[in-house]
Image: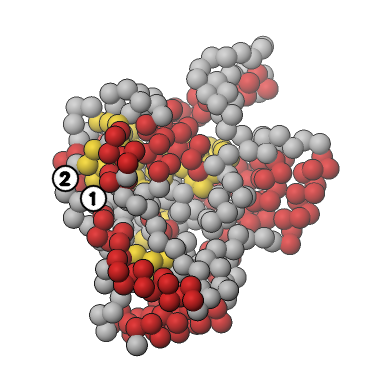
Amino acid sequence: MIKFNVPPHLEDSDKYVLDSMASGDIAGDNKYTKLCEEILAKKFGSPKVHLTTSGTTALEMACMLADIGPGDEVILPSYTFSSTANAIVIFGGTPVFVDIRPDTMNIDETKIEAAITPKTKAIMVVHYAGVGCNMEVICDIAKRHNLILLEDAAQVVNATYKGKYLGTFGDVGCYSFHETKNYSMGEGGAVSINNPALIDRTDIIREKGTNRTQFFNGQVDKYTWVDKGSSYLPSDILAAYLYPQLLIMDEMRQDRIDTFNLYYELLKPLKDAGKIDLPVIPEGCVHNGHMFYVKTKNLEERCALQTFLREKGVGTAFHYVPLHSAPEGLKVGRMSGEDVYTTKEFERLLRMPMYYKLGKENTEYICDMIKEFYK
């Protein structure tokens, strides 16, 4: 069976995890946490990067920093994971969903301005499948309307848009190191604080609302509760597992891109024959090989293809049920404009196995089985 996902496990991971355990300093903000944060901040050119317990809590921190509250609206795509909207809802905000582009499955930047109302406080973009949104247009919209810009960059660690790392365009960028992501610590994430004015408050929020960081830096003589916050620090053991992956970030990305390119090359004849559609990488985007998917004619064909591949020993997965039509989405959010592509494209999309060291042989077998289905 070719699994849909296999989390990366490097040989050095065991060494660093054991070192962390032996140190006795296994809480957050210790040796490996700091090493990971330094690598990420230097790599992305970010003023500050903090590890978090998950991509979800990174999004929650972003909404807390943006002071999202009752009466505030946040514009986001309907085609995303529940965490993106939950981060808005738990603080009393209202998610305002807009349609996606059919080529990249990202938010349709031309639909954003029509969704803006006097209650709009922020835009939260979601970069899907390792491919960036049109940040040139979106940054301009946010600036002209004086809106906070947040990035759900869970799937685009080490991907760029016009030479700039995704997750560093907005006031805050949110990454994920879940076991299904390119770089993994099992459960984990990070925030990139790109607006320097938010750095001090970030330190407070992630330390349960206390000024503990300032105390340890000698900025205050005692620490106390000064703001809202939560416990967003992952164990240093988890950071130790992530650390060796960050040392070879580009090598791991290239391995996945090579697999992506092989998929595309082998399946292009089916695309040219009008049988399937394949991912689109717009000009200016350098993706990270996070995902490879095919789009079938319709939902019925997608289900049939998934069943066929499962019988042939290939694990696949579809993706998000659009949030505007989900039970909770109907209660707490609203759709701005029409759903022209979100549901239609969701019903066609099937994700193929994609992970570090998937290998040429496995990829060729998967493509052979897809070709066999379409015979």
Identify which residue is drawn at 37% across, 53% down.
320
The residue beneath circle 1 is 99
List the residue tagged with mark 2. Answer: 337
How are the colours assigned in the image? secondary structure
Q: Relative to 248, does residue 109 appear above or below in the rendering? A: above
Q: Secondary structure at mark 2?
A: loop
Closest to the observer, 4 or 280? 4
- At mark 1, the secondary structure is loop
| Separation of marks 1 and 2 at Cα, in angstroms | 8 Å
- Would you identify the image quadrant in which residue 147 lies? top left
Q: Are marks 1 and 2 in contact (CB under 8 Å)?
A: yes
The residue at 58%/44% (across/down) is: 188
- Please state which amino acid type lies under the numbered disc 2: Gly
**Marked residue nearer the N-terminal end (1 or 2):** 1
Residue 103 visible, this orientation: yes
Dot 1 alpha-carbon crowd within 10 angstroms: few under 14, some 14 to 19, many 20 or more: many
Dot label at residue 275? none
The C terminus - image quarter: bottom left
Looking at the figure, which quarter contains the N terminus? bottom right
Q: Quadrant of residue 358?
A: bottom right
Could you tell whether 241 is left or right of 229 in the image?
Answer: right
